[in-house]
Each structure stands twice: as C-alpha cells, then as structure tokens.
Image (tube, rainbow, N blue to C red):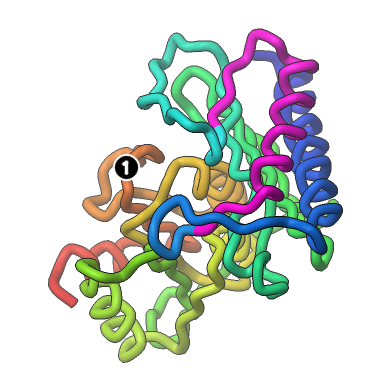
Amino acid sequence: MTNDQLLEFLEAAQEAARRGAAVLEEWRARFQVREKGRFDLVTDADVASQRAIRDYLAHRFPTHGFLGEEDALHRGQPRSDDPPLWIVDPLDGTTNYVHDCPMYCVSVALQLGGELVVGAVFDPTRPEMFASARGHGAWLNGRRLQTSKIDRLEEAILATGFPPDLRGQEQTLAWWRHFSLCTQSLRRTGSTALNLAYVAAGRFDGYWGFDSHVWDIAAGVVLVREAGGAVSNVHGETFNPYAPDAVASNGPLQPILLAHLRGEP
C-alpha cells in the first residue's frame, strides 16, 4: 500500500461517512423503528445509510470487502491475507437518533493486512468530521488532534457504554459506581464511536467497555492511536477489535485503567 493509496482510502472513508449521514438526515422525519432484540433498536434510516455507504465504496473499490452493522450475517475475524475490508456502523447512537438527541454519528474504517489503517467518524449534528490514517495523525475538520496529558484518575473524565439490555449484566453498573468514586466525572453518550473520537480530541481522557462490536470501535481505534493515545483489551494484550472488551485512553492513564479493570468493581 502506497502513501497515495492510503490517503485515497482516507478521503473515501470521509466521503462515505458524509453520504451515510446525508441519508440519516433525509430520513429523520419519516423513519420506522424496529427492534433487533430487546431495547436494541434498528431504523429504516440505519439500513438506508448502510446501503448508500456500501454502494459508494463498492463502486470505488470493487475488490474490497464490506462489513456493516446491519448485515444479516456477520462474518468472523478476517485473516491477514484477506482483501481490504471496510467496517461500517451506519448509525452509531441509534437510540439518541430516534429521540432526536444530537449524539450520533457514522463510523467508517478500513482494515488492511489485519490492521486498522483508516478511520472516519462523522457527527452530522455539529457538524464534525474526525479522520485519521496510519502515520498521518488524527484530525477534526482539518485541525490536528492530540490526546490529553491527564495522568491521574482524580482529574480524568471517562466515558463508557452500556449494553442495550442490562439484565444479567449488572456488573456494568458496578463499574460505573467504581469509577464514579475515583474520577472527576463520567459520561455515557450512547455512541461508542463518538466516545473514542472524543478521547482522540482530548475531550475525554479514557474509555472502557465490555460490550463492543468491531463496527462500533474500528474507526475510533485509529483516531485514538494517531492522536497519541493507547488502545487495548482489558488484559492489556495486543488489541483485538473483534473481542467484546476495549479500553482506550490518552496514554498515561492506560496502565491505571487496566489495573482497576483487572480487579473487582
């Protein structure tokens, strides 16, 4: 992969995210809501946004693969020799979108040779485009991003996400209580992709989650890394975006967060 190709992929990711977001805005007054599972909403807007993104990327890169949240069948983890794979969440923050709460976005990432190399997260309500490519830094509307320098939990703002249905997963609430008592503040935005983008931008200092999907976090992982932050699974091993747990931070807080999360809330 040449540098020019990487930048072409980054430009395509941003354009795809914009096209998906345009579809979301068109559907705002006329979508129908269904449930994938209890409390797990899907709208006609999600499906239409993903279709627009898939069609655009397939036209530009017909040999590339595509994995979207609204796919009926989710494939397993790709091999390093598989074709480049676009990983897309056409609407991250569906519940917010349904309730007209302006905390939702479109997330588009590219995995190549087993590595996440491009990420774009577009929030159409502000509007803000977070974009990054490996070795090229992370950017917000053309302004370079850098993670925060906070190195004490007492001064940190952390974010997390909850599963759609908390029944049987009450430990999530225990971790919320745990970090409420040892940080400056916590945030639950309802959008994992925006949580990670905000870590990259220095708005949040860290993020943890136990119910992640690859389409939720793929673009955000590239953003955090390129802004100078760190991403790992809870046990600190080489990060696997297809595992359900993820911890991201500005860097200095990473070992502190991991030490907490390896214990009991």
Looking at this view, name the residue that lies furthest to the left: 264
Q: Residue at x 74, y 51 (%)?
A: 139
Residue 65, magenta (yes or no): yes
* Location of mark 1 (residue): 243
Q: Taking 187 as reference, is 127 above or below it?
A: above
Question: What predominant SS class does the magenta segment belong to?
Answer: helix
Q: Which residues are magenta?
A: 41-67
Which residue is more in the foreground, 22 or 137? 22
Q: Image point 46% across, 50% down: which residue?
A: 36
Give neighbour class at mark 1: few <14, some 14-19, many 20+ (Cα, 10 Å). Answer: some
Query: Three-letter amino acid code at disc 1?
Result: Ala
Quarter the N terminus occupies: top right
Which image quadrant: the C terminus? bottom left
In the rendered image, residue 89 lying in the magenta stretch gets the answer no
Residue nearest the observer in this picture, 50 or 189: 50
User: In which image quadrant can residue 194 be found?
Assistant: bottom right
